[in-house]
Each structure stands twice: as C-alpha cells, then as structure tokens.
Image (tube, coloured by chain):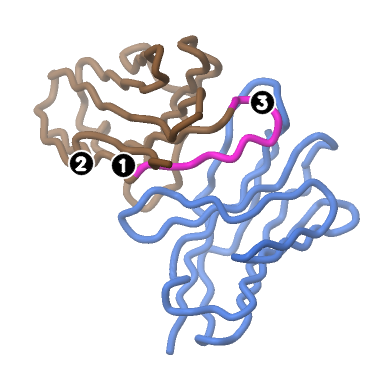
Amino acid sequence: ETGVTQSPTHLIKTRGQQVTLRCSSQSGHNTVSWYQQALGQGPQFIFQYYREEENGRGNFPPRFSGLQFPNYSSELNVNALELDDSALYLCASSLDPGFTDTQYFGPGTRLTVL
Amino acid sequence: DAKTTQPPSMDCAEGRAANLPCNHSTISGNEYVYWYRQIHSQGPQYIIHGLKNNETNEMASLIITEDRKSSTLILPHATLRDTAVYYCIVKAAGGSYIPTFGRGTSLIVHP
C-alpha cells in the first residue's frame, strides 16, 4: 500500500505567476482534500474533491482551483500568485468524504512566492 | 463544525504520560473529536478519534468527558519522537466538510 505523495517538494515562483501542485492519493482512497499551512499556523482547508467533483470549499478565492482525475489523483492550481500564498500546501486522502473519514496527509509542497 | 481551544504549548519528561487537553464546548451531537499531530516539516498524522466513548489504540488514549465539551489525549509513555504540534478538531460525520485546525499544542518531550 503506497502512501500519499506530493510533487514537487519545493517550488519558487514570482508574484503574478501560476502554479500547479500535484497529489497522488493513497491506494483505494477516492477523496482528496487540500490545505494551506502558513508558517506557525494550523492547516487551513482549501477544498475537497470526491469522485472528480468538488465537495466542499473553504474561504479561498476562485484563483485557487482544483481537479481530480479518474485515478483519484489531484491537482491544485493557483493563479495570479500573491506573496501571501507562500506556504506549505498539504494534500490528504481518505476513503470517502462522509462517515468518520480519517485523513492521511502527504509531506506537502513548500511554495515560496517572491 | 465546532471550534476547539488548546493550550499553545506543553512539556513532558520522557517516559512520563503526556496529557493534552482540548475544549470543544460547542460540539454538536453528531460531531466526532479527532486528534492529529504534525512533526516538524512533515504532513499531519492521524492519531485517534472518538464520539463519546473513551478510545485507545497503539498510539494513544482519548478520554471524552460525559458532556462531550472537552477531551484529553494521553500519550502513556512519551518519547522524544512524540515532540510535535498536536491538533484537536471536531467534525461531523457527513454534511458539508469544513474541518478547522487551530494552532494546536506544541508538545516538547525532554530527556
């Protein structure tokens, strides 16, 4: 059984650029959630995808968008990057979005916006 | 989902029990209490969860008060590798999914 993987591990972008982060869910999991974690803060929920459809969204602007593919892997896209987007981006997978779903997190992608 | 309150930091001697409290006074009847921890520079790791009964697994024990307004995570024999930030969150089974992680408790286990 493989765990949750994310790529790349680190990324440096400049303000105004666009970025795509990738996540492969744990084997057998059909739900992926994305979180943003600023330095010294807890993870903040961005959105969740279940069977290729968005299934809940936190308080993030539309320039944060996502996709889930038929193999349940997922992408997080951020357009028009701002300095405050610098953070650790975490992906978590779970068996399903509903009843007592335990999330398994990946190691994260560290994004730096200059 | 209900919010939680945790002390910002705690410390514990290696080999002793670490008892991490969490207040969730606005918890609803269908909300579970989950605990995760995050070791520096890694993704959070699931520890344990419960609804109203006390729970135990190979990592920890979870004690939930009868009124469910607070809980305690117990690491029975803390080791240096247990040094991490511990998050207590509450979330409902099903429904809209907006889990809320606070700042957690930074636990330092010292020799």
Residue B64 percent across, percent down from the top left: 80, 58
Residue B30 lies left or right of residue B15; in this view the side is right
* Subunit ID for the residue under disc 2: A
The amino acid at mark 3 is: Gly
User: Residue A9 has which mark?
Assistant: 2
How many circles with numbers are drawn on the protein?
Answer: 3
Give the labeled residue for mark 1. A108
Label 3 residue SS: loop
Quarter location, residue A56? top right
Residue A53 percent across, percent down from the top left: 49, 10
The residue positioned 59% from the left and 86% from the top of the image is B16
Whole-number angstrom distance, CA of label 1 to CA of label 2: 7 Å
Q: Are marks 1 and 2 on the same chain?
A: yes
Label 1 residue SS: loop
- Specify the colour of chain B: blue
Q: Is residue B73 above or below residue A32?
A: below
* Subunit ID for the residue under disc 1: A
Tell me the crowding category of disc 3: few under 14, some 14 to 19, or many 20 or more residues within 10 angstroms, Cα based.
Answer: some
The part of the chain drawn in magenta is A96-106
Q: Are marks 3 and 1 on the same chain?
A: yes
Q: Was residue B91 drawn as part of the magenta stretch in this picture? A: no
The residue positioned 77% from the left and 63% from the top of the image is B63
Observer-nearest of B68 and B25: B68
> Chain drawn brown, letter?
A
